[in-house]
Amino acid sequence: MTLPVLGLLGLALGAAASAPERWQTLTRLRTLGLRSRETRWVAAGELLPPAMLAAVGGPLLGVLLAHLTFGSLSLHLLTGAGPAPAPPWWGIGAVAVAFVVAVAVVVPVEAAVRRRRRLSEVLRAGDG
């Protein structure tokens, strides 16, 4: 339970750390004619690939490493009998769904915070 929570915390912190650059890019795109609804899709498109890679690749890598290490460190080698490891597939699916839901929550919250800033303030030279 700890690792998915830390992963979601990492996603939230990563989204917060990259938010100013994303806001600048989305503001420039808005000046070129992008609608505010479309900016949410662009933000989701930027946040979703790393989240999906973490949600799918992390558990698959964990299962692969478990099978590799359980093969050489197996209890079967010492006792002659033992159960095969069975990963909780429902938990792995829940982690993947949690990451997608986290992106679905982060994007509207970020859009609401971004709405408070005026377009002219963000595009002013020298502002961060």
Image (spheres, rainbow, N blue to C red):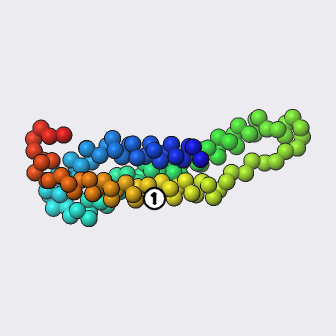
Between residue 58 and residue 99, name the one nearer to us. 99
Q: Position of residue 105 (x, y in %)?
A: 39, 57
In the image, what residue occupies the spot 20% across and 54% down? 116
Q: Is residue 45 visible?
A: no
Residue 94 placement: quadrant: bottom right
The answer to whether 2 is drawn above or below residue 43 in the figure is above
In the image, what residue occupies the spot 37% across and 54% down? 106
Q: Position of residue 115 (x, y in %)?
A: 22, 57
Q: Quadrant of the C terminus?
A: top left
Q: Is residue 1 left or right of residue 73?
A: left
Give amino acid for label 1: Val
Q: Is residue 13 left or right of residue 4?
A: left
In the image, what residue occupies the spot 20% across and 61% down? 34
The answer to whether 55 is drawn above or below residue 41 in the figure is above
The answer to whether 37 is drawn above or below residue 65 in the figure is below
In the image, what residue occupies the spot 56% across and 43% down? 3
Residue 43 placement: quadrant: bottom left
Q: Position of residue 91 (x, y in %)?
A: 62, 55
Among all residues in the image, which is located at the extreme right? Answer: 80
Query: Of helix, strand and loop, which one carries label 1?
Result: helix
Specify few, some or many for label 1: CA neighbours under 10 Å numbering under 14, 14-19, or 20 or more.
few
Residue 79 placement: quadrant: top right
Q: Is residue 59 visible?
A: yes
Q: How many marks?
A: 1
Q: Is residue 24 left or right of residue 81?
A: left
Q: Is residue 76 left or right of residue 102?
A: right
Q: Position of residue 81 (x, y in %)?
A: 88, 44
- Which residue is labeled 1 in the image? 101
